Amino acid sequence: MKLMDFALVVNIVIASIIGVIAARRLKTPGAGSLFVLSLCITTWSLLNLLHEGPLSRLSGLFWMATAYLIFTTLASAQLTFCLSFSNHPPSTTSRTVILLGIVPALTQIIFWLVPKFNITDSNAQITYLLFTGFWGKFNTLYIYSLLGVSVLLLANTFLQKPKLLRTATVTVLLGAMFPLAFQGNNMIGALAFSSIDISLFAYTLAILGFSYSLFKPQSLGTTTLTREEVIEKMGDGWLLLDNQNKIVDINPAVERIIGLPREKLFGKTINTVLPDFPNLGPTSTDGARELEMKRSVRSQNRWSYLSIRTLSLTDAQKNNVGRLVLWTDITDRKMAEDARQRARDEMFVILNAISSAASNTINLDDFLSESIYQIIYPFRSQAVSIFLIDETNSKDQEERLFLASHFGLPPDAITGMTFLPMSTPFIRWVFENRRPLLVENTDDNLAFPPSMRETDLVCFLAVPLIVRAGEDNKTIGLLCLARKERPIFSQDEIIRLTAISDQIATLIDSDRRRKLAIALSERQRLLRDLHDSVSQKLYGLVTLTEAAQAALEAGSTVNPSHVLTRIGENARQAVKEMRLFLYQMQPVDVEKDGLISVLHHRLAAVEGRADIKARLLADEKISLSKDKEVALYFIAQEALNNVLRHAHAKSVSVILKQGRENVILKVMDDGRGFDMKKVDRGGLGLQNMRERASQIGAKLKIVSKPNEGTKLIMTVRKEQSSARPKPSRRRTME
């Protein structure tokens, strides 16, 4: 084997190995260009190896055209590789490839179609095509320009690299210089294609240098960025001022913010260009200062939020040479923060309104209805419903939910959703996972009952009502919302609705606990009252009857009239206590019905049926607040209870009259009275009356003597009115 043939074989092996490695690492920048270089070198070496053998009969023109196409492709591929290595990503675009292919394509057309190029002597043809004539000179300039630009790009990259990272760049730079040097030698020596072109081996040395980037790809990402890549393309504004506060340089971002082209800004002072902005020029204090402001972008006619930071620029002698102003458009961030703040404020208002509804409503239905009204509009829902676990269900029946409150549901859907078994797929999923369920379409979703699928709802959201008490969390129901049009519920809305549902669940549980505590307390009070009043009277009847019977059996003298009188008195007193007991079990709403109305009902229901002549004298219009009316009622009730239980009175009068400044309540009876000096002033009845009177700033006076009855007088200031009082009429009830 000849020495040249051996060199060609080695050339093929080296190029093939590098080509395979590049093909397996195509994602590495420049690997595609390196693969093309390796493929061209392998093809060129193989053609040269076979030219003297099986391919020796091929047309000289075909041989020369192929060799020249590979020659120009190598130069173009080297340039694209150097562009990638120099951090120029556009080199890999199809537009660049097309531009680099224009000259080789035109050369091939001229090579085959122009008659005067059809020279039988291949050496003369190539010499004419490459080195003589207008097109030949143009091609030579084109190829050497590609190789020269490649070297310049890598040299610039080498200079910009940190010293520790220049090894990779110098290796690639030396590889790019070999083809340029060898091509220059060919041009000077006018070497023909009849022998092996030594440029072939120069490109082999080039790809050996380029292959370093395949094994050290991180070297590509450490190239120092240029001003074009950083300042001109950055989204933040970049403005340079000199010591006279004049604009020296800006980037396109500042042009967009200010709304003026840079040609109209250079050389002008910043205060004349932006008169509404604060002074951005030098100040008496060195260092950086930050400003944040809201300004209108005139070119876009909208409000933008700008974060402005100014930095002092100094030279080597620490002298101030100007200012650098950095502008950051934070409009999107501000808008997002404002939206979040509005959502938080709205959330606070809703939670506060729901808590107020829980405090001001009497029953659960009103509270749930008020909660739904607070939710439906802020969350743009057309239907809202609240389901709670049915606690009245027996143990042998399947657990189910009942529709506690709703808004916006069609009548047919309400009928089918009054009770939903816990086994309903969407209910079971929410209870098991304890997190919201969002469904974009309920039409064909079998997880929903038919009554829900037949509605025209676009999206549906079910949020669990969870009572959170440490580790003992308990799900008591569902809060369901639906929309008839898009968009669906966002993640932010779901988070806020989860917090609202927790609040509703907590208030429902608190209401239940409060009612249970009230029921237990009322039960204990009733038991105590029954024991202290009715049961004592009945026990006295039994004792009196048994004593009379025992005396008769023993032969003692018994006065039947006296015994029957005492039995009658105890029985009547027991009836009085029972009527009072039954009356107290009925709810009384002074704020709703009014003081005079509830006093009238009390006298008619208790004293009027207990053989006591009751009389109510009251002015029609009493100028008192609701709190004072409630206090007056309970004081009057306590006084009437004492009359019923202890006074043995035959008549009682309640007088309520209004003067110029005060309202006076009197409760008078003709009972047996008591000695004021011997009365227990610490008794609960009198103590309660004094505490209630003190709470509303009233004066309480009690007058009583044995066998002369009792009089209670309470004076309280009436509410002041700007209108002139009209004469009041007295209302009488007997």
Image (cartoon, rainbow, N blue to C red):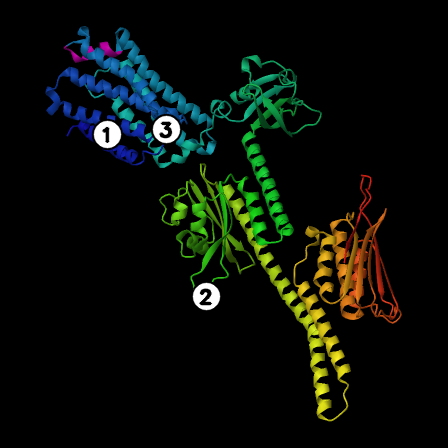
Which of discs 2 and 1 lies nearer the camera? The answer is 2
The label number, if any, that marks residue 395 in the structure image = 2
Residue 708, picture quadrant? bottom right
| Alpha carbons under labels 3 and 2: distance apart | 84 Å
- Residue at 40% from the left image edge and 47% from the top image edge: 451
Quadrant of the image containing the N terminus? top left
Write down the residue under mark 3: 172
Residue toward you, 180 or 504? 504
Q: Amino acid at mark 2?
A: Lys
As drawn, 182 above or below 565: above
Q: Which residue range is magenta in the image?
A: 120-130
390 left or right, relative to 282: left
Report which residue position mark 1 lands on.
11
Return the x and y of residue 188 as percentages of the image width and height. Answer: 29, 13
User: Can you say which quadrant of the picture contains the C terminus?
Assistant: bottom right
Which element carries disc 2, helix, strand or loop?
A: loop
Q: Secondary structure at mark 3?
A: helix
Relative image position of residue 514 (x, y in whole percent) = 62, 59
Mark 3 is on which residue type?
Answer: Val
